[in-house]
């Protein structure tokens, strides 16, 4: 039983408390129970009905994603949506006031249930997030969200919330009219009782109200011409953001536009059909799989270390005050960890502090941070040109230049000043953590902790273990990664680890395509047409050609000639065309980005390679490398590859990940296409590795 009812003094209370679960979800069984309960309640003469949750920090997390995942037919999808809509309608149609008491997360179906109530009471709990994030899963709200939210908070706010899939906190909910009252969590029941008495005296108060808008927003809200402008601008921003790969946000706009003035029954019929249309698509299935994958890695644990408790980390040190070092220090302070930033002189430290402040400045500009909060957080970062203060830190992260000799020197020095319990981590992107560990005082406390740039935006962190790394070190580092809000993936020490090893093969193959007479802009366009966030040459310029070529040489040394830099990279680098940081690379980076004629002049004239073959080649080298990583047990499964590539490189989420994409092609077809390319090039880079051939021979996929 997950729904309970009690009645006292003519006030009814429905409480959600799903057994053996940290959250409440609206699955079929819960909806059926609630449906029958509401049939009994409609004939009662209650003063007020309260709907609440017994879970800490959770109201209702949403509908049951597993049930949505199993929808394969339109009729089934529509039926499931209508079942939820029926329950929400019954709540809305009760002859007495209803109050949703929200002291935690209310997402998707949970938000839709709250919308069906006449009132919503929330608390100042900073864990509250309320919204309709369904488009992130490839479908539109299906329990009446597209119908009720615009009528409650207005068209512009509703479109913003639904299309962006961004939940809001309780303060924002109160400001836009989604919440009627805000109370402290302490003493909430007493405050709710007072509110109940207040509304019981006016039981016929209107369900819907619009927030009073002024100026242009009011004009856009209240007349058909203004609404047309709102729809047009919303569609334009969606197309720019999604590049047409994600149909759900556009479908949500279409549903709201069609139903804004329709009666409830007709509007909900359109909504349920739209939900069903999208829920059965491969895009939705891939996004749902990604949701599960993300949840898994948010809760990642170390196998066999269940009894090892993580050590608390309150103070950290960062050696190297460059862009990465400053970014790491900023992240530490933002998450309440004191940061000691070290470099060789005060100028370098000043640059690191500026890099940290710039992140906060952007947040203030977007009104995501208050000046006094920023001042307090910046005060948690201090600078030093020596190792003073290092004896008291819980973790020290090396973020110096990508040079093994320099890193080993730092490791030897730092390990002698840290406490016996402190962890020493490297932010290296490709070098051997094992080699660094060997020069440290205690190799068991050494680990790789690879952030991606920019640190505050990129969600992934690679945790690299060596043969020496203790379980205590790994468990503590993993726990710390979660504290920093990152999605962690555990990787065994190997050249390039996971993400860079796969990504550099892709970039290098793009270089080979250019060597064959392609154009910089065409190859970049092929990649973005596929769904990559940027083309390989744009990415090379962002990272820096010197960095990319250096990593390619490291991979070539460790893994073989398939990583030998293509001709174009070897010819561009000596010209000091380093990319964005030098103003010129494959592109000239000025007010407008244009192709660099110096580089284009190095390209052989020719027709180039077709878009289809270009994508095949760039994807195949990545898939083959990923399979070799699995073969070598660098990571523990295909899901680690896919979460790494999506979170670390922006591999298109709608494709489900690199290896889900490989599965969608079919392993037999993949092998056949790779073998044709290998027959042409005869250099081994397209030769299917043993792992892929085993899948083919056994009739399996990467995912079973």
Image: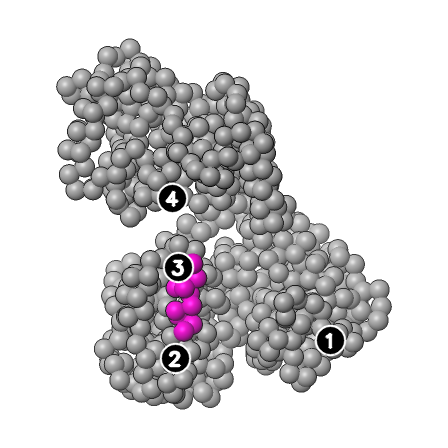
Q: Which callout, 4 or 1, points at the residue further toward the start of the chain?
A: 4
Tell me the quadrant of the picture where the N terminus can be found.
top left
Dot 4 corresponds to which residue? 168
Q: Nearer the viewer, mark 4 or mark 2?
A: 2
Dot 1 corresponds to which residue? 599
Q: Is residue 475 above or below residue 71?
A: below
Dot 2 corresponds to which residue? 350
Q: Residues within 10 Å of mark 2 (few under 14, many from 20)?
A: some
Query: Quick one: 284 or 466, which is closer to the camera?
Result: 284
| Residue at far right of view | 606
**Left or right of 517 on screen, residue 497:** left
Q: Which residue is rendered at x = 36% and y = 71% of the image?
A: 329
Real-space Cα separation, disc 1 to disc 3, in angstroms = 39 Å
Q: Which callout, 1 or 2, points at the residue further toward the start of the chain?
A: 2
Contact, CB < 8 Å: mark 2 with mark 3? no
Q: Residue 330: x percent and y percent?
A: 37, 68
Q: Residues within 10 Å of mark 1 (few under 14, many from 20)?
A: some
Real-space Cα separation, disc 4 to disc 2, in angstroms = 35 Å
Q: Which residues are magenta?
A: 354-365
Contact, CB < 8 Å: mark 4 with mark 2? no
Check disc 2 and report its element: helix, strand or loop: helix
Q: Nearer the viewer, mark 4 or mark 3?
A: 3
The image quadrant that residue 435 belongs to is bottom left
**Left or right of 37 on screen, residue 560:** right
Q: Which callout, 4 or 3, points at the residue further toward the start of the chain?
A: 4
Residue 361 drawn in magenta: yes
Check disc 4 and report its element: helix, strand or loop: loop
Magenta highlight: main SS: helix
Q: Which callout, 2 or 3, points at the residue further toward the start of the chain?
A: 2
């Amino acid at each position: 039983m997950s729904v309970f009812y009690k009645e006292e003094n003519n006030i009814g209370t429905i409480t959600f408390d799903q057994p053996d679960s940290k959250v409440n979800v609206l699955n079929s069984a819960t909806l059926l129970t609630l449906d029958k309960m509401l049939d009994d309640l409609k004939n009662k003469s209650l003063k007020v009905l309260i709907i609440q949750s017994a879970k800490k920090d959770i109201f209702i997390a949403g509908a049951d994603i597993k049930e949505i995942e199993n929808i394969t037919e339109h009729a089934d999808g529509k039926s499931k949506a209508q079942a939820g809509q029926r329950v929400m309608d019954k709540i809305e149609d009760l002859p007495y006031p209803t109050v949703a008491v929200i002291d935690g997360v209310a997402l998707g179906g949970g938000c839709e249930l709250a919308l069906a109530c006449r009132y919503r009471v929330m608390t100042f709990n900073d864990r509250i997030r309320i919204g309709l994030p369904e488009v992130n899963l490839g479908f539109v709200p299906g329990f009446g969200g597209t119908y009720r939210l615009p009528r409650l908070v207005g068209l512009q706010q509703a479109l913003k919330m639904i299309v962006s899939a961004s939940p809001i906190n309780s303060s924002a909910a109160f400001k836009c009219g989604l919440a009627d009252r805000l109370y402290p969590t302490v003493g909430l029941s007493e405050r709710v009782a007072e509110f109940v008495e207040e509304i019981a005296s006016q039981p016929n108060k209107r369900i819907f109200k619009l927030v009073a808008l002024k100026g242009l927003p009011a004009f856009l809200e209240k007349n058909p011409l203004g609404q047309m402008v709102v729809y047009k601008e919303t569609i334009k921003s969606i197309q720019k953001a999604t590049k047409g790969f994600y149909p759900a946000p556009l479908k949500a706009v279409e549903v709201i536009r069609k139903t804004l003035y329709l009666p409830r029954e007709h509007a909900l019929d359109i909504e349920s059909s739209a939900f069903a249309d999208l829920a059965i698509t491969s895009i939705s299935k891939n996004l749902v799989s990604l949701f599960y994958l993300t949840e898994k890695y948010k809760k990642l644990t170390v196998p066999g270390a269940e009894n090892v408790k993580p050590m608390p980390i309150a103070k950290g040190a960062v050696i190297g005050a460059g862009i990465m070092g400053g970014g790491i220090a900023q992240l530490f302070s933002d998450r309440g960890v004191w940061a000691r930033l070290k470099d060789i002189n005060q100028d370098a430290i000043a640059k690191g502090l500026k890099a940290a402040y710039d992140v906060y400045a952007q947040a203030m500009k977007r009104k995501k941070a208050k000046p006094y909060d920023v001042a307090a957080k910046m005060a948690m970062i201090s600078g030093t040109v020596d190792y003073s203060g290092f004896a008291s830190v819980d973790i020290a992260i090396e973020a110096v230049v990508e040079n093994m000799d320099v890193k080993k020197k730092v490791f030897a020095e730092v390990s002698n000043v840290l406490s016996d319990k402190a962890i020493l981590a490297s932010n290296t992107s490709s070098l051997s953590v094992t080699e660094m560990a060997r020069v440290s005082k205690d190799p068991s406390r050494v680990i790789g902790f690879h952030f991606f740039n920019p640190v505050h935006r990129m969600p992934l962190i690679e945790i690299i273990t060596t043969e020496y790394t203790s379980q205590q070190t790994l468990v503590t580092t993993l726990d710390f990664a979660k504290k920093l809000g990152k999605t962690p993936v555990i990787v065994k020490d190997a050249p390039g680890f996971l993400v860079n090893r796969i990504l550099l093969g892709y970039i290098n193959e793009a270089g080979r395509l250019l060597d064959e007479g392609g154009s910089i802009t065409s190859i970049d366009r092929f990649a973005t047409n596929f769904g990559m966030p940027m083309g390989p040459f744009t990415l090379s310029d962002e990272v820096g050609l010197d960095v990319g070529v250096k990593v390619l040489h490291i991979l070539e040394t460790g893994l073989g000639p398939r990583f030998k830099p293509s001709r174009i990279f070897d010819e561009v680098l000596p010209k000091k065309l380093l990319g964005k940081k030098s103003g010129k690379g494959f592109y000239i980076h000025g007010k407008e980005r244009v192709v660099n004629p110096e580089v284009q002049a190095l390209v052989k004239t020719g027709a180039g390679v077709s878009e289809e073959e270009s994508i095949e080649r760039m994807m195949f080298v990545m898939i083959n490398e990923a399979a070799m990583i699995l073969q070598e047990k660098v990571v523990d499964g295909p899901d680690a590859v896919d979460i790494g590539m999506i979170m670390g490189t922006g591999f298109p989420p709608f494709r489900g990940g690199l290896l889900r994409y490989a599965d969608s092609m079919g392993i037999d077809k993949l092998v056949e296409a790779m073998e044709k390319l290998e027959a042409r090039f005869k250099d081994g880079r397209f030769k299917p590795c043993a792992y892929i051939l085993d899948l083919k021979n056994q009739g399996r996929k990467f995912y079973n």
